[in-house]
Image (tube, coloured by chain):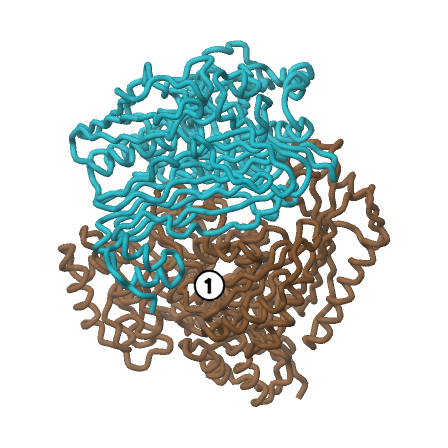
Amino acid sequence: MSFDPVLLAVIQNGLRQVASEMDLVHEKTSFSPVISEGLDRANGIYHKDTGEVIAQGETGLPSFIGVMQFSTQHIIRLRKDLEDGDVILVNDPYLGGTHLMDVRMLAPFHYAGKLWCYLSNTGHWSDTGGMVPGGFTSTATEIQQEGLRIPPVKLVRRGEIDADILAMVLGNIRVPEERLGDLRAQLGALKVGARRLTELLDRYGADVVEAAIEELKARSERLMRAHIATIPDGVFEGTSYCDSDGVVFEKLAIKLRMEVRGDDISFAFTGSSPPCKGPMNCPADLATSAIYVAMKHVFPDVPINAGCFTPIRVTPPRGTFLDAQYPRPCAGAAAEVCQRVMEAVFIAVGQAMPERVFAAPFGTSGNFSLGGYDPVEDRRYIMYMFSGGGYGGWPEGDGLTNGCSTLSIAKTQPIEILEQHFPVIYEEYALREGSAGPGEHRGGFGLNYRVKLLRGEARASFVMDHGVTGPPGLLGGAPGGMLAIEVGQHGTVSLPPHVSKGEGYVLEPGDWVQVRTPGGGGYGEPAARDPALIARDIRRGYITPEEAEADYGRRIAAE
Amino acid sequence: MTPTWQIGVDVGGTFTDILAVDPSTGAWRVAKVPSTPDDQSRGVIEGLARVDAPLAGIAGFVHGTTVGTNAVLERKGTRCGLITTMGFRDMLELGRRTRPNAYGMTGSFEAIIPREMRLEVPERMGAAGQVLVPLDEDAVRRAALALAEAGAEALVIHFLHAYANPAHELRAAEIARAVWPNHYVTIGHDILREVREFERGSTAAVNAYIQPLMARYLSRLSDALARQGMPRTLLVMQGNAGTMTARGASEHAAQTVMSGPAAGALAAARIGIEAGMRNIIGCDMGGTSFDVTLIKDGQPAISAEKDVAYGVPVRVPMIDIHTIGAGGGSIARVNEAGILQVGPQSAGSRPGPICYGRGGTEPTVTDANLVLGRLDPGSMPGVESPVPVEQVKAAIREKIGSKLGLDAIAAASAIIAVATNHLASAIRLVSIERGEDPRDYALFAFGGAGPLHATALAAELGVPQVLVPRFPGATSALGCILADLRHDYVRTIGRPLLEVEGAAMDAILAEHAAEGRRQIEAEGVPIEGIVVVHEADLLFRGQSHVFRMPVASPGFDPAVVLRDFAARYKARFDIELGEMRSIIANLRTTVLGTRRKVPMALFAPEASGTPVPRARRPVHFRGVAHDTPIYRREALPVGFELPGPAIIEQMDATTVLDPGAMLRVDAAGNLIIAVGVSA
């Protein structure tokens, strides 16, 4: 079928708009600030037979693109009994999942009396039970410690919520009344999505839309292949390291081998570290999804649907920590390990065509959760916070300061909103001076914040990364500054033994946590940097004159 | 003399357009003069002389401008200083952890107030408005002195949680004002009394960044107008398409961001309604930019927040306008990869396109239109000494054609094709990407360059109809005449809905309404009536996004509001949260002073009979020269029909009718173009 280009564009964007509208309902009605302010959620439309992604909302979390497709495929395989009006609830990391906090729902969508596609969404709930409020345990050794694991169960049967399932779930997580609100927000998004999709199909006809979906998939694949063909043929390697698994203090290596032949590209993880004890195991589907997202960052203009991933082949990472099997814990997979996978892709692509990519970004979500009791409000709470850091320098300029993590487009929550919701005060939320990796184009700067508990008692946990090695530079640029955490309790300051990971820090009023996130890697030889830019950086207090001399080998005074 | 004239002025990057209407006699005049960026009031005064409206006879003078928007985009605003809460000076630079595009790890950002101009003072409010750290008054004084010393002209005072308790901001402002050399002191909560420190701070920073420019300009203009005997207060358009006084606009400069385009969108909506087209896409193309607005069922879309540039949000309600840097002055270049690119660089009005003869050397979209025969070299608005067409042709051949292996005509066609494609992508963004099908809409083409490209643009998008209003170049100026006076008020409540007393809510809303009436009366603009709209922002405890809905007052009944809230929430989101506690976050009131309606039929042409082309000349369409009739717009009577190709010229714009398209003049003098299949 030859398509009118306008009609094709209208349908492509109409489908994406359905998912974006779902995103919007989900965001506006949620109770977890990490969803309502942080947009840590995604909504999409998936193929009825293959489970492949047809469209995803524009503001959805990028790393969910691939995984929600995999998770839909698992549900199609496991649940042959889905009926119109059912909604599946699942958070199992081993079934196309991430960590337990990412709770997914899936609804079969029927049109003209038959199954037409699946609508699905994921939201990061502030808690799903487990040994640490907020779920970011860094010392769990089996999944049961991390929280409630929900296999694909029918939360809604033919339009009726199963009160038993609901009670079972809410009975096992912290602050259940707000989680009930999050759950309803997600259900509401699915309903609004179904309404909008019906309107779209009524307007253009289901057969026309189906044909358009096939055409769009073919076109995305063609475009991705055209891009891949511009990478020089050859075998390239990228190695990146996680600081530790949180239990054993040893680096975990991701060894990525990238092979380019014409318009085909393939990746293998041969030689990466074996499964680990702590929660840095990563489900294989998530590792694959991370490669997809990294390739989207390298070639941003390919429209997202299953077609843009077809030319990318990934050998399953069997026998490594990138293939988490039950009951391996995986709380750090979604936010941290998958960013290290992306970093390995950037390094490999950087070897193939350094003039077209960027040095490594800060690459950690900076997961920090605080769970406690507020005596004034008589309320238990979970505060989950993530943060930004510096991007790598790139061919045309310095890296961005306090950019968003690679896997995400989630904005950080306003400090004022956090302070409204939780009994804390931020004493500092600042640019982290001196953290940028030097280079002709230096990295961007990381973030430096300190938060103090005002009342009651709380427990703090951290799952972060890049505290042992800095984000590497490219073409002679130096690595960015490493992540650092400090905890102040009763006037004593301590550093987590695993640098970027730790849990169970009991805080009392006046106790505090300080986090400094990494800067981005530098791009190009530092000696080639424009002295006027070095002088500006000194004037702005980004770096000291001493640092300038050490990093750039020249003595420059601020004018 | 009884003042009866209504004047609308739109100061764009390239041209200043003026429309004068006297509704009592039906008289109107229109003028277009080059903008004078060094002192824009000169252009306005000159334009005013052209329309020859007696200044003593002016009943209303409303002004739209892009001064502020352009200053932010080009980072050419005032040097500002920031005094903020200890620990938070980097807020404007850090933002909320974003990147310019969802995919791609590149891009750069410069805060509008650089780091060395941002200072901290000890002070801290809690989220409930409680004082956690008292304000260090000496530190405020020292910081203000240091920033003034460092050359700051405008000062921003922005503290955490000032929306909850503004005491520290107010006191700091008092101290700073005592030592600040001028009155350019912007206080965060005064600009926006809402939670979210980055958005509030950024809005305040934008306000300070453009305030001195606006204030200087508006006071020069007000003075000049007063000197010449204008009896009325100068009014300024806001981004929400209402107006306020020049004095108000210099205080709340952030409200004027996008005000020129907002006026255009307002006029487009009104003209569309009168022409029987309620779904239109407003396309305003001038010399430097292309502004697109989606108008559905007669209402322009409104957004609560806009990024004026990446990382620079302004959180004030405004008409949702998408802008790209593409206009008649957009420069065409062939890049290193041998690809033809048009814009975003613009030649502006100085030096302007090559054909303007003001020293421009780079080929622009306007030059391409001239070479293709679409523009008349003899009658370009505001151009005194045009360059011969052959010379423009030679420049296009040399700078574009030779690199692409094309002759001058083919190169000019290529420039237009690339520009049209670029414009179409902007229209797709506001329609298709928001789930709207452009084929359900009509294109409303305005601005000096809009009607030149509209038919081809509509054909590319599958849009069946184009509407070219009577004065394409002066549409934004017309919007200024149509705009109502508008004042918005908000009061933060932040309490459980069922715990507030209805009478107390009524009292606040009545106070808003009274203040609005007082303001409007003080502005002294003739109005037909006053409309008051009350709204409330509600949410469920634990959420952070509010839901805005109308409320009745007097007679505010919390139980009734709650029922209404639940019902509207269910209808919008399909969610019932009945057992959750409802919070009333804010009360809002909008007070509108409605101005006398100017009927569009006023502008209908008086011509009758069958018009005769003023001339014929070869015009190139799709690489083929057509012998094309050239008509004067004024000569086309109501009801006249004309098949393409044709060119319709008027003082403020040129309309191109492509082969295959069919034109009809409607009762208000609008050109309604059926795009046709072969166009």
Q: Relative to A548, say whether A316 is above or below.
A: above
Of residues A356 and A476, the one drawn nearer to the viewer in this rendering: A476
Given the image, what chain letter belongs to the residue carrying mark 1?
B
Residue A544 seen in the figure: yes
Q: Secondary structure at mark 1?
A: loop
Residue underneath mark 1? B113
Q: Relative to A201, say whether B537 is above or below.
A: below
Query: Residue at left 56%, top 47%?
Result: A414
Of residues A530 and B353, the one drawn nearer to the viewer in this rendering: A530
Q: Colour of chain A?
A: cyan
Query: Residue at left 25%, top 53%?
Result: A440
Residue A94: give x, y in percent of width and height: 45, 17
Q: Quadrant of residue A510?
A: top right
Residue B561: give x, y in percent of width and height: 78, 44
- Disc tally is 1
Going by the image, does A91 lie left or right of A218?
A: right
Of residues A506 and B496, the one drawn nearer to the viewer in this rendering: A506
Residue B350: give x, y in percent of width and height: 33, 75
Crowd band around label 1 with a 10 angstrom C-alpha radius: few (<14), some (14–19), many (20+): many
